[in-house]
Image (spheres, rainbow, N blue to C red):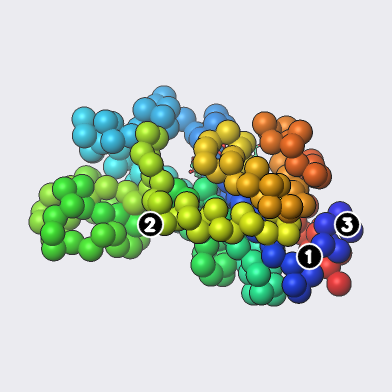
Amino acid sequence: MTDVSRRLTATARITVMTGAGVSAASGVPTFRGADGLWKQFRPESLATVEAFARDPKLVWEWYDWRRQKIAACEPNAAHHVLAKWSRRFHHFNLITQNVDGLHERAGTANTIRLHGSIWEVFCWDGCPTSPARWRDETVPQTKIPPACPHCGGLIRPGVVWFGESLDPQVVELATAASDCDIFFTIGTSAVVYPAAGFVDLARRSGAFTVEINPEATPVSSAVDLVLRGSAEALLHQIEEHLV
Ligand code: NAD
Ligand code: ZN
């Protein structure tokens, strides 16, 4: 712990990658926990282009339920410590797989969002008068499925679905951020690529790599230091040891 805190200096290039585990203490359901199931549907069968094309109402009902749950959640100690670091350290980058917006709500600016945001939408048909994407924080939706204000057609959540590729510009930013001095992977099962690959990239760039997770993951054996426990407790402890 003190070793990690000692490495967090004014000149260190610090990069943190987070997953759903960081929001668990806020009460945001993960996909893999029992709470991840909604009306017996698996996220893998709802968060796809095919599911939306088949039944946009069903998919939007699920997103509306998730948006309501998230809107009722508050950032936890993990989000707050990371927000503090983003202001305190000059070379700080946060890469997140989360779509809940809790890092932003805690005050972290310039978050690199690999999987988009549940608070953004875009036109399903890509109508020419609509922006590429825009914020929509209507909770609950007044009409499901909601309509595109520009063409009257469908809008879809601004998240990356299973089988879709990530925004190349976002991947570029995350790749650049992986070249750092200390890299944390926190609250992610690290099985989804390319997210899992960033730990590898960081190691090859010479970074000291740290995993924070209550459970073992595929990257546990590859990192320099494993801190077993919750993000909210361990980040708080690291923060307390900072000089
Ligand atoms: P995941 O694959 O990132 O796994 C969650 C990890 O968090 C597990 O390894 C678990 O051991 C760990 N964990 C649990 N509680 C923790 C705690 N208190 N502190 C630290 N670690 C903890 O997440 P998933 O739920 O399987 O979701 C996969 C993808 O689905 C995400 O990458 C994301 O795109 C999307 N998703 C996002 C959210 C969100 O925005 N909060 C929630 C669910 C799913
Ligand atoms: Zn439209």
Q: Nearer the viewer, residue 56 or 2?
A: 2
Q: Earlier in the sequence, mark 3 or mark 2?
A: 3
Residue most toward the right? Answer: 2
The quadrant the C terminus occupies is bottom right
Q: Nearer the viewer, residue 214 or 216?
A: 216
Q: Nearer the viewer, residue 207 or 221?
A: 207
Circle 2 SS class:
strand
Q: Position of residue 25 (x, y in %)?
A: 64, 48
Can see residue 221?
yes
How many discs mark residues in the rendered view? 3
Left or right? Give the position of 57 relative to 23: left
How far, Cα to Cα, is label 3 from label 1? Answer: 9 Å
The amino acid type, in three-letter code, at marker 2 is Trp
How far, Cα to Cα, is label 2 from label 1? Answer: 32 Å
Which picture quadrant has residue 57?
Answer: top left
Q: Residue at x 47, y 52 (%)?
A: 171
The quadrant the N terminus occupies is bottom right
Query: Do the residues under discs 3 and 2 have CB atoms within 8 angstroms?
Result: no
Question: On screen, 54 above or below 237?
Answer: above
How far, Cα to Cα, is label 3 from label 2? Answer: 38 Å
Is the residue at mark 3 in contact range of ligand 1, meaning its CB lies under 8 Å from it? no
Label 3 crowding class (10 Å Cα cut-off): few <14, some 14-19, many 20+? few
Q: Position of residue 199 (x, y in %)?
A: 65, 45
Query: Do the residues under discs 3 and 1 have CB atoms within 8 angstroms?
Result: no
Q: Which mark is residue 119?
A: 2
Left or right? Give the position of 75 relative to 157: right
Which residue position is annotated with label 1? 8
Q: Earlier in the sequence, mark 2 or mark 1?
A: 1
Q: Which mark is residue 90?
A: none
Which residue position is annotated with label 3? 3
The amino acid type, in three-letter code, at marker 3 is Asp
Q: Earlier in the sequence, mark 3 or mark 1?
A: 3
